[in-house]
Amino acid sequence: MSHSDPALIWQTGTVQEDVPGRLRLEFAGSAACARCASGKGCGAGLFSGLLLLSAPARLPLPAEAGYRAGQHLRAGIRPRRLVIAALLLYLLPVLAFVTGVLLADALWPASDGRTLVGGLLACAMLWLPALAMVRRWPVQVDRIAVCPGFPEPTGEPGRPSG
């Protein structure tokens, strides 16, 4: 499996020192994506902003791996994991909204306002716990690889270069 394995979805991050001797891989938000900045992105930046997921993601790194602060790495995940998170955060709330609308319409057939509120309440009742659950999930990365084309930091492993 190479660092450009097409079976994985890759995200580039920078190694940061958390506390002395402990490293993490930090991923920039969608603002760092050139396609998002030009308005030609996939839409993930828009949705992550709507879902309050715009803070940089952080992944703890094993100390024995020998990474250096400032080093650029790529983390790869299987598409299945992304699909499961998307279903929880996008599809299930939409289905809850439609179910809430249909139920509220059955209870109050002539009230569009109550129908809308019923749909929104059902959506929120499902989306908020799903969001909390996804945020608590441990990040499961299938592969970490050094990014080609970036200069390597010069410091000792686990220490910032400089």
Image: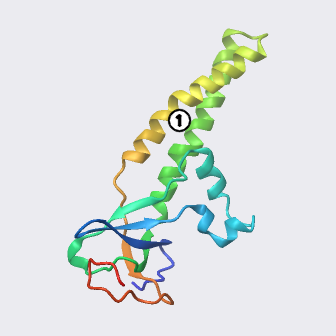
The amino acid marked with disc number 1 is Trp
Q: Nearer the viewer, residue 153 or 100?
A: 153
Residue at the image point whose x is 51% and y is 78% from the top: 6
Percent across and percent down for residue 83 are: 51, 56
- Can you identify the residue that label 1 sits on? 127
Q: Nearer the viewer, residue 92 or 53?
A: 53
Q: Quadrant of the N terminus?
A: bottom left
Q: Residues within 10 Å of mark 1 (few under 14, many from 20)?
A: many
Asked if residue 149 lies left or right of residue 110, the reply is left
22 in relation to 153, above or below: above
Give the number of marks: 1
Q: Quadrant of the C terminus?
A: bottom left
Q: Nearer the viewer, residue 35 or 108?
A: 35
Residue at the image point whose x is 71% and y is 18% from the top: 115
Question: How is colour applied across the structure in the image?
Answer: rainbow
Asked if residue 159 lies left or right of residue 16, the reply is left
The residue positioned farthest toward the front in the image shown: 162
Percent across and percent down for residue 151 are: 46, 90
156 in relation to 11, above or below: below
Instruction: Determine the image quadrant of residue 117.
Output: top right
41 in relation to 122, above or below: below
Percent across and percent down for residue 22 are: 25, 67
Instruction: Determine the image quadrant of residue 111.
Output: top right
35 in relation to 54, above or below: below
Residue at the image point whose x is 35% and y is 76% from the top: 69
Q: Nearer the viewer, residue 72 or 139?
A: 72
> Which SS class for mark 1?
helix
Percent across and percent down for residue 16 are: 37, 70
